Amino acid sequence: MTQPARMKFGIFMAPFHRPGENPTLALERDLELIEWLDTLGFDEAYVGEHHSAGWETICSPEVFLASAIARTKRIMLGTGVVSLPYHNPYMVANRMVLLDHLSRGRAILGVGPGALASDALMFGINPERQREMMDEALGVIIRLFESTVPLTVKSDWFELNEAILQLRPYQQPSMPIAVASVQSPAGVQVAGKHGAGVLSLSIPRDTVRKTTLKELWAIGEETAEKHGKTLRREDWSLVVSVHLAESRQEAIEQVRRASGRETLEYFGQTLGHPAPDVAPDKVVDFMVERNLWMIGTPDDCIAYIEELQEMSGGFGGFMIRTSDWGTREQILHSYELLARYVMPHFQGTLAGIHASQQWASERKVSLQENRLAGLRRADSAYYGKGGSQG
């Protein structure tokens, strides 16, 4: 198993907001969360692109992230993801390079084929072609990032004539790129072909899924080798639903109502995805029992990540799929618990502290003797010269 010396932590923000609440305030709360993560020392925040179905309400991650730039100092800001079949690839490249400059090198291009069938229907896109369209577009975007040679491409869905980007990426040699991978091998194949990072949005846990995490990574590595590229495990991130509290039962109760609503009302009733055949208030128990969600304490989360490391053979980033499952205060506190107790465990920041504490503990008897000897000498020096004894 390959483990990074320092694991990255971040969020994958669709976002998910239940219809019926003020959408402007929901977007403001999303920005507030990214500000909080920046303060806590999180590494990355990915923001998605969706155009229909009522729950995922950010239509342009680039515009949203431009607003987040002004509110943050160090956190990397990624599109999670730009749905490439919806756009001319030149425009995606242009917007991302501008974002890279405005953020002074904090931009990540996350790409995918498009998650919602309703979006594809509105745009007249054949869902069967979305993955090949993503692959074609990504190849063009990378060439635009890396070369100033005029590029002419005549595709059946876009056309470029002697295209050159005026601005080059701020990050050199180029900005990071990550490809979304859900259940099929398509995502890791595209990542391998282009030498990009991987965002795994689904964790295989049962026999229904045909391909394990290790097998998916092997497919990506095999594809990369065929194209003379390299996949790096440190650029592989797993996305998981997480909520933490001081006790496991407290964490579960905090998300019980809202998590059931999101799962059954949105994924089941709105999108038609398979959903647990349980009552809404039992969804969290169903998902936790099967280890599909991480709801519990910081210690539970540490054990969960270690299990994922074993399952996968090693990965470099742990991303929390954001959801409105608790109150504002409970959600912010969950991320604080993760930053205080989980992140240090996987980032090497506690090694010196533990070593120093152990060193002092092993010498506590002699150190106390030295401390008392110093006090006795100080007393002797003072009182031996006739100092006041009152």
Image: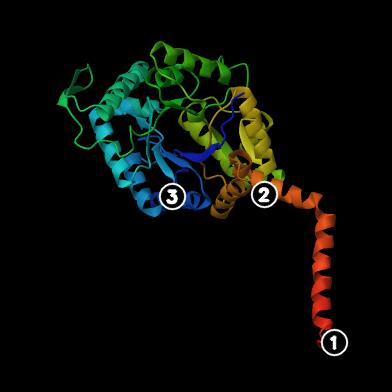
Mark 1 vs mark 3, foreground winner is 1
Alpha-carbon distance for marks 2 and 1? 41 Å
Q: What element carries label 2?
A: helix
Circle 1/circle 3 CB separation < 8 Å: no
Q: In which quarter of the image is the C terminus?
A: bottom right
Q: What element carries label 3?
A: helix
Q: Is residue 25 left or right of residue 123?
A: right
Q: Which residue is drawn at 20% across and 33% down?
A: 165
Q: Position of residue 186 (x, y in %)?
A: 43, 17
Q: Which residue is drawn at 28% across and 37% down?
A: 97
Residue 281, visible in the rendered structure: no
Q: What residue type is labelled 3?
A: Ala
Alpha-carbon distance for marks 1 and 3? 69 Å
The residue under label 2 is 353
- Earlier-in-chain disc, 3 versus 2: 3
Mark 2 vs mark 1, foreground winner is 1
Alpha-carbon distance for marks 3 and 2? 40 Å
Q: Is residue 388 left or right of residue 202?
A: right
Q: In which quarter of the image is the N terminus?
A: top right
- Earlier-in-chain disc, 2 versus 1: 2
The residue under label 1 is 389
The residue under label 3 is 26
Q: Quadrant of residue 263?
A: top right
Residue 301, visible in the rendered structure: yes
Figure check: 51 above or below 310 = below
Circle 2/circle 1 CB separation < 8 Å: no
